[in-house]
């Protein structure tokens, strides 16, 4: 069998849109406002901007340079750098795949909330409604044997949508969807933010962003939080930028593109948080609940606090509520498809399976794993997956990638690749950041994550984490050992 034709973006705008779509996700909408608030408000922007430039953009550039130079999948690139490194690629991709299995579930919950939002079906007590009526959540592990039908159906819908996008040719699928959804997403956020600023009490909220707590800057955890947000928000180390950059045509301006993508992503989360804070300020004024009790993150913010706000918002809520959940849906879909593309690409390159069949297999297996989250203990297991995969596994993978590209690979070749066509050039400073500063920061973040996870985990969580660890060691080794059907898998001409 011959190698399938290599996909290529038909325009730079498709690439940039897909990259921004991959970065702008649930993390921007519900993670950032909380991180900003808990780490000094306005003054947090200093560590945040430093992390964005020094670490975020720097690592995106590594992924761009590697993907663009080799024009191959992560598995093949790592094999080429050193044969023994191939399992590391499958390790990264498995983490990304497992993250997607629960990410899709949260997008599925959001899909349910779009429907509920038209009639505010969550009633007077959104907290109980979410736990009991939507999730049928139980603390007992026997809940694993009860399937929650509405959650299962919504997860199936999201996997179907992802399959429908991924099986198509690059520009007809991911390119088209990114160019369609991203402007709509931006328009929705502008409407929500503009509306939120007209609400009484909005200033109680947004003033928090502009009220700095300078003493926070001397706290190293604040700097780690800033860096952690950048890693999460820019989806660093997940092989997304590397895969998307490998589809770029010759002559692309890599550095310029990376800066546009990173600025758009950060611009989105800062702008969006003005809306979120204003709405929470309105809630604090109307309900008398202190502002700090309202600022939560994750599902608590989206599916509990926001429905509470919509309950007291008056007639406008029937427009703003569906728009809010639609915004999460679009942000989630463009990120989930990016997470899966890198996984599909490595599988299809090694085993010479065409795009459609790979997407079908990956989405079916993904859906089957996601069914765990559609059980009575789904949200508990999801929490453990999220903590373990993000705090432990992913950061460890990013650290490995940093060491591989910074130390094992001929790094100077990457500088030449980046500078070839870009107006903005990189040099020695970038090299120092990648080789020394970035690994130290990632290690700090990782150690902090490991410590906080181990000191807070209960015995059920520890059991799930041990199972995940075994899977994350065994499966990548098996995938690396499986013979490649693609004869060119081991030859990269460069
Ligand atoms: N950057 C995206 C977001 O902020 O939601 C995508 C993403 C990042 C998904 C990290 C999952 C994840 F663990």
Image (cartoon, rainbow, N blue to C red):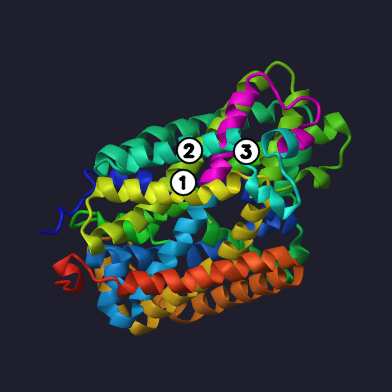
Q: Which residue is mark 3?
A: 148
Residue shown at 86%/42% (left/top)? 290
**Residue 384 screen position, x and y as percent:** 64, 59
Check whether the beta carbons of the residues at disc 2 and disc 1 lie within 8 A of each other.
Answer: yes
Q: Is residue 266 visible?
A: no
Residue shown at 65%/40% (left/top)? 274
Mark 2: secondary structure:
helix
The magenta segment is 104-130
Give the mark nearer the N terminus: 2 vs 1: 2
Residue shown at 72%/27% (left/top)? 122
Q: Is residue 224 visible?
A: yes
Q: Is mark 1 within 8 Å of ligand 1?
A: no
Q: Which residue is mark 2?
A: 156
Quadrant of the frame with the N terminus: bottom left
Q: Is 110 within the magenta?
A: yes
Q: Which mark is residue 367?
A: 1
Q: Is 224 within the magenta?
A: no
């Amino acid at each position: 069998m011959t190698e399938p034709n290599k996909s290529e973006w038909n325009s730079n705008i498709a690439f940039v849109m897909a990259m921004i779509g991959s970065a702008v996700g649930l993390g921007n909408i519900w993670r950032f406002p909380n991180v900003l608030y808990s780490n000094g408000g306005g003054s947090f922007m200093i560590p945040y901007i430093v992390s964005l430039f020094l670490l975020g953009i720097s690592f995106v550039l590594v992924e761009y340079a590697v993907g663009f130079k080799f024009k191959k999948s992560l598995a093949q690139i790592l094999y080429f750098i050193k044969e023994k490194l191939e399992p590391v690629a499958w390790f990264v991709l498995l983490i990304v795949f497992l993250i997607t299995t629960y990410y899709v579930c949260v997008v599925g919950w959001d899909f349910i909330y779009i429907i509920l939002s038209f009639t505010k079906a969550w009633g007077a007590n959104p907290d109980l409604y979410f736990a009991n009526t939507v999730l049928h959540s139980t603390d007992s592990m026997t809940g694993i044997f009860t399937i929650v039908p509405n959650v299962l159906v919504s997860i199936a819908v999201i996997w179907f949508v992802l399959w429908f996008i991924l099986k198509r040719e690059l520009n007809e699928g991911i390119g088209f969807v990114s160019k369609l959804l991203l402007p709509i997403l931006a328009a929705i956020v502008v409407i929500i933010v503009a509306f939120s600023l007209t609400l009484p009490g909005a200033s109680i909220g947004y003033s928090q962003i502009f009220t700095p707590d300078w003493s926070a800057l001397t706290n190293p955890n604040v700097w780690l939080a800033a860096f952690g947000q950048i890693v999460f928000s820019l989806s660093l180390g997940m092989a997304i930028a590397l895969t998307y950059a490998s589809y770029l045509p010759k002559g692309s301006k890599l550095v310029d593109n990376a800066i546009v993508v990173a600025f758009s992503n950060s611009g989105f989360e800062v702008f969006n948080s003005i809306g979120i804070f204003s709405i929470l300020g309105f809630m604090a004024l109307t309900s008398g609940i202190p502002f700090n009790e309202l600022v939560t993150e994750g599902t608590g913010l989206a599916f509990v606090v926001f429905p509470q706000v919509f309950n007291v918002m008056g007639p406008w809520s029937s427009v703003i509520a569906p728009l809010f959940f639609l915004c999460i849906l679009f942000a989630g879909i463009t990120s989930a498809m990016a997470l899966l593309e890198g996984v599909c690409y490595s599988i299809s390159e090694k085993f010479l399976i065409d795009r459609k069949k790979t997407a079908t297999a990956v989405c079916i297996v993904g859906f089957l794993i996601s069914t765990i989250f559609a059980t009575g203990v789904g949200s508990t297991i999801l929490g453990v997956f999220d903590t373990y995969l993000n705090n432990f596994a992913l950061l460890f993978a990013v650290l490995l990638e940093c060491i591989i590209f910074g130390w094992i690979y001929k790094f100077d070749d990457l500088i030449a690749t980046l500078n070839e066509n870009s107006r903005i050039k990189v040099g020695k400073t970038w090299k120092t950041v990648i080789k020394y500063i970035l690994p130290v920061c990632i290690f700090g973040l990782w150690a902090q994550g490991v410590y906080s996870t181990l000191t807070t985990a209960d015995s059920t969580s520890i059991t799930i984490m041990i199972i995940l660890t075994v899977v994350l060691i065994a499966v990548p080794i098996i995938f690396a050992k499986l013979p490649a059907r693609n004869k060119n898998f081991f030859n990269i001409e460069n």
